[in-house]
Each structure stands twice: as structure tokens, then as C-alpha cells.
Amino acid sequence: MPNSSYLCTTDAESLYPSTTVADFEPSTHVVACDARCVPLLWLAMFRAADIRTQTIVIEADPDEVSFEFDVATGDFVEIEGEDEEDEVVEAVAPLVAKERALAQLDAAVPVLNRLFEAEGPLDDHAAMLRQAVAAAPGRFITIELDEIDALWEEGTFQPALRTALSAMDASADRAAERADLVEIAQLRAGRAFPPARFLLDGRDAADDDFWNFVRLLGTAFSAAVPWEPSN
């Protein structure tokens, strides 16, 4: 899924575990995912102090095959590639022990309820996310969000993320913090949040309601999530 974010658990205290952790298993270690945003309640599990920086080496794939279009034949033909070198990346993302993340989620809910008072309370939604995270294997939780960072103007995403996470402790500028959270989560603000059982109850609703519901919690990647029907 291009330009997506992934909520991941891992036993290793490492960013981007899908790349850095040898025994990472997407079917169980990816709690949820979403496209072109980071869901609001994922953010609630982290604080600005939880943002880490880590040097990651992405090993070149010796078996990678490249193709180019041959005008003469009208076909794509395999080309001999150059010896690729490993890529070194400075990764930045939130990472925290799972138990602390769940405690921070609980503490953030009243703050979000105040920031989004017009849209409605998020206690039941947070309880479902808590259930999914608690059930996932691994002692740490992180968000793989480099594909979202890449969608923003260079140098703007990380400051907005830090401001948004700072709002979870104590609101200093309600309007600015709300605006950052809306932008990162890509919420269509100004309408009531769908209830936590929105998808489970199979309610008919406007497209904006379906959109906002996923922007609150994300969606299943492989393992089932409590807020979506299992069939």
C-alpha cells in the first residue's frame, strides 16, 4: 500500500522493525495501517519525548531485476544492473514501551475530547485501539511513517508531529494543536465522529463518516482489529 503508515509492535527497541528486526512478522506485528495519514488515536499513544532517531542500513538486494522499454521491440527487456550499494538512512519516528503507550493513550483521551469537543468523545474508540495493541505480540510499539513524511513539504512534517504530540500532555494553543492533529490524521473536521461500533453495526452513513472513522483508528492490515467485522 503506497504512502501508508503502519502501527507496529516488536520485541526489539528499534524503529522501522519491518526493515530492522529479523523476526518481524507483518501478519502479527502490524496492528493496523492507513493510507496518506497517521490516525488520530495512534498519535495519542506517544509524546514528543518518544520520538527517536536511528541510523538504519537498508541492504541492497543482489537479486533485484530491472527492466527498460525497448522501442524497437515494443517490449520491456531485462537490463544488466549496476552493483547496488547499501543505503544508510537516518530514521525518525516515535517508539515507546507498549505498557507506557497504553497508559499515555488513556491519559490523552480527555485532552482529545476537549480539543474535539464538537465532534464527540473518543473513549470507546480508544478502548478498541487499546484492546488491539494489548493483544499484539511485542514489548514496544512504533509507527512506520516515512511514507507520510514524504507527502509533506520537506522539513514540515516532523515539527508538526512534535507539536501534535506535545498537545497530548497539556494544551498550550488549542487552535494550532487541533489544526496539526487534523492535518496529520487527515480528518474531515466539523462533523460528529462516528461511534466506535460504526463498522460493526453496519450503519449506513455518508462517505465523510467512513473516511473519518478510519482516520481515527486505521484499518486492519492482516490480523483482525476490534473495530472492524472479522468476516
Image (cartoon, rainbow, N blue to C red):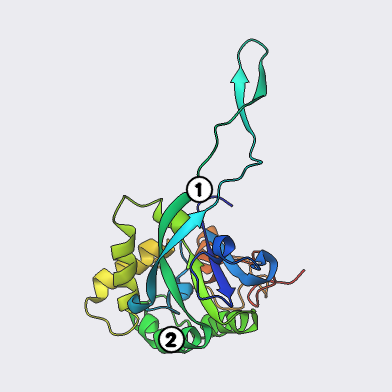
**In the rendered image, the vertical position of residue 71 relative to residue 189, given as above or below:** above
Q: Position of residue 85 (x, y in %)?
A: 50, 43
Q: Which disc number belongs to residue 86?
A: 1
Q: Residue at x 52, y 83 (%)?
A: 98
Left or right: 34 in relation to 74: left
Image quadrant assignment for residue 131: bottom right
Image quadrant assignment for residue 206: bottom right
Element assignment for label 2: helix
Q: Which residue is mark 2?
A: 104
Q: Amino acid at mark 2?
A: Gln
| Circle 1 or circle 2, nearest the eye | 1
Query: Which sits in the foreground, 164 or 193?
Result: 164
Left or right: 12 in relation to 100: right
**In the rendered image, the vertical position of residue 227 relative to residue 107, given as above or below:** above
Element assignment for label 1: loop
Query: Which sits in the foreground, 28 or 212?
Result: 28
Q: Residue at x 55, y 36 (%)?
A: 83
Instruction: Looking at this view, name the residue that lies furthest to the left.
Output: 173
Q: Amino acid at mark 1?
A: Asp
Q: Position of residue 63 (x, y in %)?
A: 66, 41
**In the rendered image, the vertical position of residue 207 relative to residue 73, given as above or below:** below
Distance between mark 1 and mark 2 Cα atoms: 37 Å
**In the rendered image, the vertical position of residue 132 relative to residue 35, given as above or below:** below
